[in-house]
Every structure is written in structure tokens, then in C-alpha cells.
Amino acid sequence: MIRSAKPVMGPPLPVTRTPDGKAYLHIWRTGRSYAQQKEALYRREWTNVLFSTLPQPPAERQVHYHDVRKPMPFPDRTFDAVYALHILEHLTPAEAGTWAGELFRVLKPGGIVRISTPDLEDICRSYLRQLDACRNTPSKLNATRYWWSVLELLDQLVREQPGGLMSRTVATGDFDAEFASIRYGDVFDEFAPAASRPPHTRTPLLQRLRGCTLSSLIASIRWRVIEILEPGHAARLQQLLIEPRRTGELNKWMYDALSLEMLLESAGFHEYHRQDHRSSMIPNWDRYVFDQSTRGTHPIEPSLYFEATRPA
Amino acid sequence: MTAPMLARSPDGTVNLHIWREGQEYLRQKGPCFLDRWNSVVFAAVPGPPLANTRYVDLSVSPLGFPDETFDAVYAYHVFEHLTPTHGQRCARQIFRALKPGGIWRISVPDLETACRDYLEALQAATVDPSRLNAVRYQWAVMAIFEQMVRDRTGGMMLDAIEKGAYDEEQLRQMFGDMLQPLVERRSGQGRSAHETQPPRSSGVYEWARSVSRGVRRIARKSRPHVANRLDPRWTKEAVQWMYDRLSLRWLLEESGFQDVRQVDHRSSGIAGWSGYDFDRSNKGGYPLDPSVYMEGRKPGRPSRDP
């Protein structure tokens, strides 16, 4: 039912191939530390789609901005594998069902889908552990760890400002960096207090021009014109650009191994396997290991990793 | 500011009841609190007039009573609909509105219970993937956060009830009587004789529903800001935060309350509580809306009647 949904898609995007001739699709949303560590690799060898709910950023080389709630801009049976990194939790269950069907469609028979998402089960267990610890031994340390676990479970579901209560908690210093790094891996570095972060730096002009296409040039000129003619409208648009519900920063659902299996099963996949941050059925995964930190063997962002196959 | 006319309980105490909505709650407990307690209903817009009731949007407006007005305040399932920041502000206002020695009782859904139930249901559905276990598992997940993420009234819980995908025993355990009106509406049992709701002609009702659906569909397209009024965040239906016995205790202690203790649905330090019994189902001894219940006392010696 989902699979036969008529794809109303724009012109298909170009597909990048790996050295051994495979077509791999990489879908993600954000992640500074992730990009720093893995960008060179996935840009070179994978086809890249960045989930963006707003038609804002001009297309960069090798990265296509696409709203994954719309049909994937690729023909049927294009890819040997798809890796969707922390996308699923930003979709409503209904959107997720359609999207899983789209992944099925663009995969070749026998192709593998890999999905990573925060693990609801693990987060709940951690929360209950910290709650018990804090009740048995009330200490400042336990209190901060307990509060962090509550934030981990709830904050991204309800926040109204980018960063939400979590970044406010980091700003006040009421957190335990050790615990937070265990829970969040390298991603926790992105929470470092804003003060210690370098101010927003502009990309050098030459580099910006190099990544420039005609359409991005037109978009940028149009934006400048709107800013001048209708400053109120521009400000409203700016507000929309950061509102978590619009930008897709908000989590719209959370999954565990069971619900992920149900989702993939209803999209037609089979042979589910729970993986860890190093293991995968995707051929040549050792070359990519997108989920393992380059600083050690730990995951960049501890998650639930799950794979399934499109039946041959 | 003119002194507002406040309702007094038979024992002479002046009490405030803060709540949000819930037809089942009003039906069961309305007769007992409307004339004896003062009510603040947390709502974005005023609803139908009720005795001794004000409608206040607590996320933007203050509670609006002079300091040291009440002997007791009961906030029933309101704080989970406020962001933590607004919740803290509201807790301080309740503290101010209480007389010294006055008691604040608060109830909210329990995050801890929701998580424990979820892990249990996950385990059961993994070991034995029967349809019943799958349904119970899905409801256990929804109990944690569905009300936070829903983008239309009723959300996926209502969908599940309309599809018949629920286990009545579990619903009663998780939500007490609160979802019973929805379940009854679906199963078409109608209302039993002692309930006062007038029977509605289903033909007219269905017709009105389809008209309202049509209007909504047009409104959503042509006037997005009007349609936003149906957004659960705007109507305050959406849950904005969840508490457990620890974070609730912190909330009370940080706003200045003393002797903070967890109570159950039958017990309270509020004078004459058994006469009100807000939290027990009229149909039995079980909780009307299972929650975590917490009480604290404003420091100071209660001054006896002037």
C-alpha cells in the first residue's frame, strides 16, 4: 500500500558511486561533530541528502537539501544501501511510515537499510536508574545526573527554543560533564557553553563563490530584497527558521528496537538485525564506520542501530 | 481591586481548585467542588460559565488573587500543561495566595510509573508478540509522550480508541476513568441512567461533525493562524513537561513549601478532605485519574478566624 504510493517527485538527483561501483545513500539532518569526523568520507563516496524542512540553504556540492516528508528524489531501485542517521525521530509516526516505504522503493532488492535513532528503552532505563540513585543517595552529583536523564527523555519533545532546557542547563553549569559525555558521546561537545565557542564566522568570499550556483545566487539576492523591502516579514521568516517545530529540531516520536522492527516490517523489509556502532551488513562498512568516533572506539552519538533488508 | 466574592466551604475554609478540563472529572466531581471551592480553569479562552469559576491562561496571566487568600489549593493535572519555567512561576503564585499554614496539593501524571510500565510492556511484547501485548505496548509508549507531540486534538490515543486498538483493563489502570467517555462513545453503550448528559441524535451529530471538519479543512488552507487555534499547544491540551515524585518535590520545596510529602488518591492534609474526595472514582475505590500526588505546607502559624 505504502510502496505503491505514486512518487510525485522532482527531477532525480545525481547518484555518487563508491570505488567498487555501489550506490549508497546517506541521509542525516545535523551534527557538527559528526560532520567534522566523517564529512570527507561520505561526501566523496556516498550520495548525500540533508533533511531540511525549509527550502533555505543553497545546495552545496555533493549535499542535496531535501524534505524527507516528500518523496525521495531518486528512481526506484537505485541504491545498494541507505543509512538514515537520526532522521526517524523527527518524523510523526504517519510520516515515518510513508518515509520507510520510500526507503524501500529506492533500494534495490537485497539492499540494506540502516537506521539510527535515540533508544527510548535505554533512555527510560537510564532515567529510572538515576531516579533511584538520587532517591537512595541524595547528592548534588546524583541530582544533576537525574535531571540530565529527564532532559534526555523529554526536552527535545517539547522545546520551543533551539537547544531548549538542555542548553540552558549546560549554560548554568548544573550538569555532570562525565555523565553527559557517556550519554551523548562526542555530540556533547556541541553543547559546550556558547561563550567558549568562536563567534559566528563568515565563510571566505572566494570559498562561498566556489560553492555558488545560479539558483543559490538568485535565492540570496531575493532574500536581500525581502530584507530591504519588508523588514517585518524578514524578521518573521527568521523566527520561523529557528523555531524547533518548524526546523525539524523537535522530536516527534521515539523508538526502541521493537517499534523500529514493526515500522520496517510494515514497509516490507525483512531480516532485521540490531547492530552496534561498529557492526553492519553494509558491504565494506569497515571503510566507513560512520558511527564510531575517530577519537576512540566509542560511538559518536550513542544510539539504537538497526538494519533490515529489502527482500530479493 | 474590589474584594472578589469567594466561595466558602461548610467548615468556613476558603479553598482554590485549579484544573484544566476533562468532562469525566467535571461530571463526577463538579457537583462536589463547584459550589464549595473556588475554581481557576487553565484555558486559552473562557469556556462555559460555571459557579465560582474563572478561566485563566496561566502560561501568560497571573493567578490573580490577593496574597494569603486561601486555606488550601489543589492543582489537579495542570502543571504538566505548563513549561517548567511557567510551572515554577505558577507555584510561587500559589505560595503567595495561600495563608500561612495553608496546604498545596498537586497531582500530575507520573513519569516514573509511565516509564516502568513501558519497560514491562516492552518486555512482555518482545517475549510474547501477541496482538494484546502489542496493543498494550503501544499504549505504554503513548502514555510517556504522545500528549507532548500530538498535533491535533485527541492525537493517536483517540485514533487507537476509534480503531478499537486498546485493552480496557490497561486503560483503566493507566488513566482511571478519564478515557471512559471515549471508549463508551466508540462502543456505543450510551450513557447510563444516572449520568446527566442529554442524549444526542447521532444523525445531527454526525452531520455537525462533518460540517465542522469541512470548515476546518478550508480554514487550515486559507487562514493558517485561525486553524492554529485547534493546535493542542494553543488549546493547552498538549503536555509540556512530565514530573515524578522527585521533581515534584523539588518544585514544591523550591517555591518555599515545607513538610513536602507524597500522598495517595485518598489521603490529604486538607481539612475535611474525605468530604471532597476529588481523586477517587465515584465508581469504586480506585483513583479517578492515576497520578503522583504531593502536598506541602506554607510555613507559618495558621491564624485562626478573625
Image (cartoon, helix red, strand yellow):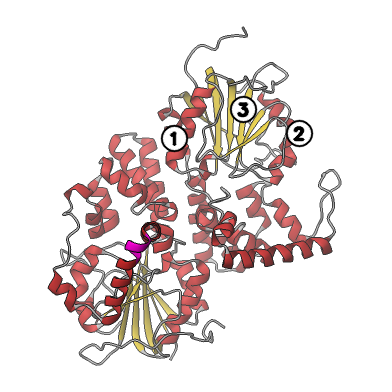
Which residue, as the protein is rendered here, is positioned at the far top? B306
Where in the figure is residue B257, as x and y percent of width and height? 46, 24
Q: Residue placed at 52% from the left, 36% from the top?
A: B61
Amino acid at circle 2: Pro
Where in the figure is residue A74, as x and y percent of width and height? 39, 87
Q: Secondary structure at mark 2?
A: helix
Q: Is residue A271 above or below residue B190?
A: below
Give left or right: position of B102 versus A38. Answer: right
Where in the figure is residue A41, as x and y percent of width and height? 19, 78
Q: Residue placed at 50% from the left, 74% from the top?
A: A97
- Toward which corner of the image does residue B209 lie, by quadrant? bottom right
Q: Which residue is mark 2?
A: B31
Q: Which residue is mark 3?
A: B16
Amino acid at circle 1: Gln
Asked if one can make out residue B100 in the rendered structure from this viewpoint, the answer is: yes
Residues marked 2 and 1, same chain: yes
Q: Which residues are magenta?
A: A226-230
- Toward which corner of the image does residue A273 lie, by quadrant? bottom left
Please tell me how crowded label 1 is: few (under 14), some (14-19), or many (20+) other residues with Cα within 10 Å. Answer: some
Instruction: Provide the major secondary structure of the magenta segment.
Output: helix
**Which numbered dot is residue B88?**
1
- Toward which corner of the image does residue A222 lie, by quadrant? bottom left
Give left or right: position of A176 versus A131. Answer: left
**Which numbered dot is residue A283?**
none
N-term-proximal mark, 3 vs 1:
3
Q: Kindly report the distance in space between the C-alpha atoms of the residues bearing marks 2 and 1.
A: 30 Å
Q: Chain of mark 1?
A: B
Q: Kindly report the distance in space between the C-alpha atoms of the residues bearing marks 2 and 3.
A: 15 Å
- Quadrant location of the N terminus of chain A in the rendered image: bottom right
Q: Secondary structure at mark 1?
A: helix
Residues marked 2 and 3, same chain: yes
Q: Secondary structure at mark 3?
A: strand
